[in-house]
Amino acid sequence: MRRRRFLAVSAAATVGVSLPGSAAADQNVPVGQLLVGRLRDAMLGIGQDNQLPSPAQLPAELARAHTDFHTCHYTSLALRLPRLIRVGHSLSSDDSEHLIVLGQSYLLATRMLIKLDEQQLGWMAADRARQVAEAAEHPLSVAEAARNLAVLARRAGWEEQALSIALNAADAPGLRAPRGGAAERGLLIQSAAYSAARSGDGAGMRELTDEAAAIADGLGGSTALRDHGGGFSPATVQLHRISAEFSTGDPSAALAAARALPPQSLPSLERRARYYADVAAALAQRGRREECVRALLAAEHLAPQETHSRPAVRSLISGLLLSGRTTPELRALAARADALP
């Protein structure tokens, strides 16, 4: 009896558990924190959810989760994605279709956890995505899991290891399929380029980025793998080039890359918001504060939950408040993003 009471109290304190009063409490939790808490509990197999989809609904629910991600509706994603993981773990591991859905759910969870700078859970999700993809014998998912692992390694400061993970995965025989395989190889080469940039190798970064751009051009210019890596096209490669140039310590080159990219050519709101956030970071480095704030407001206008949730963007806003003259616009943005120092 004592143990049951203890478990009940623990469950009631868990974010995202379907217990009386939890919905009201969730309204006061920032969406990024809510999403992380629910993913954590689903991955650990604790808590409960009484509105899980049926196995037959999983493909449609996964498609809706991808749409939530692309449109930056993270409140909806905070419900849908943990449920996909919970149901996926309850099904037979012998069903390859269900394994693929679970693997895709973990890939999407990893991307969100990376975005929210949740490294520990990110490693856990990425490794599970890799294991499930290998069990399902799904080469594109195996490669995408490797790309996420490379991103996490780079964020841990292991640039050389991140470069090796990405380039080794790009050489996998499973990526010889004409379109999807080539696009995934391009995404991996992009990731390697970013790792080169973080290690200070600007020439290597540009060589690898040009290689990725050539692959994108060879695919005819349309977006591939929109639900499997954020999309791969000449426009997404150019978006990558902005942040890669910035990572080499050259904000002027980053802004030049941004001028060559119409943001409306990017395949999703999430990618367009990322464009404006990257431009804002480069403008801040150049001391162009007013233009930086305008770029941040453009990102917020497109995707408020994305802009308010990302730690990197909130840190940029806080830094602007501390480093110079503030304006009512900037203070209001900081309040909305919970970025007041």
Image: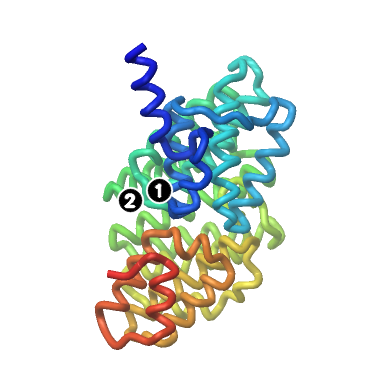
- Camera-nearest residue between 232 and 326: 326
Instruction: Estimate the x, y position of residue 125 in percent, counting from the top left.
Output: 44, 35
Q: Which mark is residue 295?
A: none
Label 2–label 1 contact, CB within 8 A = yes
Q: Is residue 153 left or right of residue 57?
A: left
Inspect this view and state whether residue 294 appears. yes
Could you tell me which residue is drawn at 38 percent across and 65 percent down? Answer: 338
Instruction: Estimate the x, y position of residue 183 in percent, counting from the top left.
Output: 61, 49
- Specify the amino acid type for callout 1: Val
Instruction: Estimate the x, y position of residue 307 in percent, counting from the top left.
Output: 48, 65
The N terminus - image quarter? top left
Q: Is residue 40 left or right of residue 20?
A: left
Q: How many marks?
A: 2
For the residue labelled by badge 2, is the local secondary structure a helix, a strand or a loop?
helix
Q: Is residue 319 left or right of residue 102?
A: left
Q: Is residue 317 left or right of residue 18?
A: left
Label 1 sits on residue: 151
Q: Distance of mark 2 from mark 1, alpha carbons?
A: 6 Å
Inspect this view and state whether residue 225 appears. no
Could you tell me which residue is drawn at 27 percent across and 69 percent down? Answer: 341
Label 2 sits on residue: 155
